[in-house]
Amino acid sequence: METEQFDAVVLGGGNGGMYLAWHLAGTGLRTAVVERRWIGGSCPNVNCLPSKNEIWSAKVADLVHHAAAFGAGADFVQVDMAKVRERKRDMVDYMIAGTVKQYENSGTELIMGRGRFVAPRTISVRLNDGGRRVLTGDRVFLNLGTHAAIPDVPGLRAARPMTSIEALELDYVPPHLIVLGGGYVGLELAQAYRRFGSRVTIIQHGPHVVGQEDDDVALEVRRMLTDEGIDVLECAEPVEVRGLSGDEVSIVIHTPHAQQIVEGTDILVATGRVPNTTGIGLNVAGVALDSRGYLLVNERLETTAPDVWGIGECCSHHPQFTHVSFDDFRILRDNLADGNRTTGDRLVPHCMFTDPELARVGMTEREAAMRRIDVRVARLEVAAVLRTQTTSETRGFMKALVAKNDDRILGFTMFGAQAGEVTAAVQVAMMADLPYTRLRDAVLAHPTMAEGLGALFSNVPQV
């Protein structure tokens, strides 16, 4: 079969690779993107945006449920999951149509099929509509993504559990949803389905939910979940699953105190991600992996193979966020034009879209202690921000870490309404190396959530 020559080939159509391909094609390079299923990647199809779409529907249901407290009448809440799904699907269709148009406008060739390396920088593609093409690229970019991990628990796979993909396609409200995993995805969907009307149980292997956060943050998140009627089992190890998800299931779990059985109707697995790096001939391409199967890349995103780069969450030690993948695109774009950008100096924000949101940028107290960095800690209850008195969104707190010997902001965490937006303001201050006093003394609009930053940084202990 004839090999087709390209200036650049991107394997995987996710965010960073997609934008890079459009940019390269726009500079006149013959560029192809090989994507097996999701035009635009998983984010607009089955992950970030669809989940936030349905989470917002759940928030609306919750607001209606509590409408009487705001002076509006509502006897009961009736959730139509088919309508929820239709709204989400309409958004996805709109996003895909725009992405296809951008491919056409950029001149990038989108090839739908499964790619596998057959030689260095040479990919054989089994086309989705039949046939095969062989592509070789002067430069190759691996934008492979990840998929949901299914723990090796006896009976779990046979129970056919949902991942987030299937959970976002339900047209019914599960009577009792059991969520394995207390990270971002698990908690977002657990709360959403509780608000849709499900009974929900979360089984968390570690000592607390949101395990990367400080203990005080995890405690407040847990309190929010239990206040909404969600059962949270921590330090709980599933050892056996019986039944079929969507019908009847039971999970035997071990805890430090006893063994118990959790019975439900549906299982959602949200216990982490696995890179899509197996079975695609990376060894033939000369691309090395780390011990967990992620691409070994340096700070310039170069793999161990010449003229082959990694992009996004398939790369080792990469935060698994779309905004990180997009920044990977910018790093590669600039370096291909003789720049010298790296991943080493970027400040990456985290945001969990529960209600209220949990957002963080920079260090946690735990990380500061592990690195033996002396910090001053300031804290402010969200209820002290007057905006919350107008909306009744008084749950949560803000916390800032300031260097002990100077006024640098080293970290910020907020669990509260509009936390993602407020965190962005602190992130900009940190990127600009502003002392905390600039936020403390800023004139901030009243009444806004960001106004709370002035009071928070007024609480920084003096040296």
Image (spheres, rainbow, N blue to C red):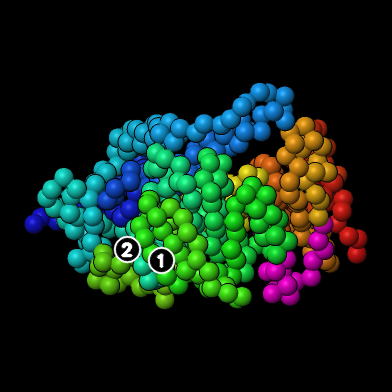
Q: Observer-nearest residue: 83 or 435?
A: 83
Taking the view exactly as shown, the residue that stands out farthest to the left is: 1
Instruction: Name the residue beneath numbered marker 2.
Output: 158
Residue placed under numbered mark 1 in the picture = 241
Asked if the residues shown at circle 1 and circle 2 are in contact, with their CB atoms under 8 angstroms apart, the answer is yes
Left or right, residue 334 beside residue 289: right
**What residue is at 77 percent from the left and 46 percent from the top?**
382
Classed neighbour count for the residue bearing mark 2: other residues with Cα under 10 Å, few (<14), some (14–19), many (≥20): few
Magenta range: 359-378
Question: Callout 1: helix, strand or loop?
Answer: strand
Q: Nearer the viewer, residue 144 or 31?
A: 144
- Establish if 337 lies above or below 294: above
The x and y percentages for residue 158 are: 32, 63
Q: Nearer the viewer, residue 454 or 204?
A: 204
Quarter location, residue 93: top left
Left or right? Give the position of 194 relative to 274: right
Quarter-wise, where is residue 384 in the image?
A: top right
Residue at x 42%, y 76% (from the top left corner): 291
Residue at horizontal 54%, vertical 73%?
Answer: 259
10 Å crowding of disc 1: few (<14), some (14-19), many (20+): many
Q: Quadrant of the N terminus?
A: bottom left
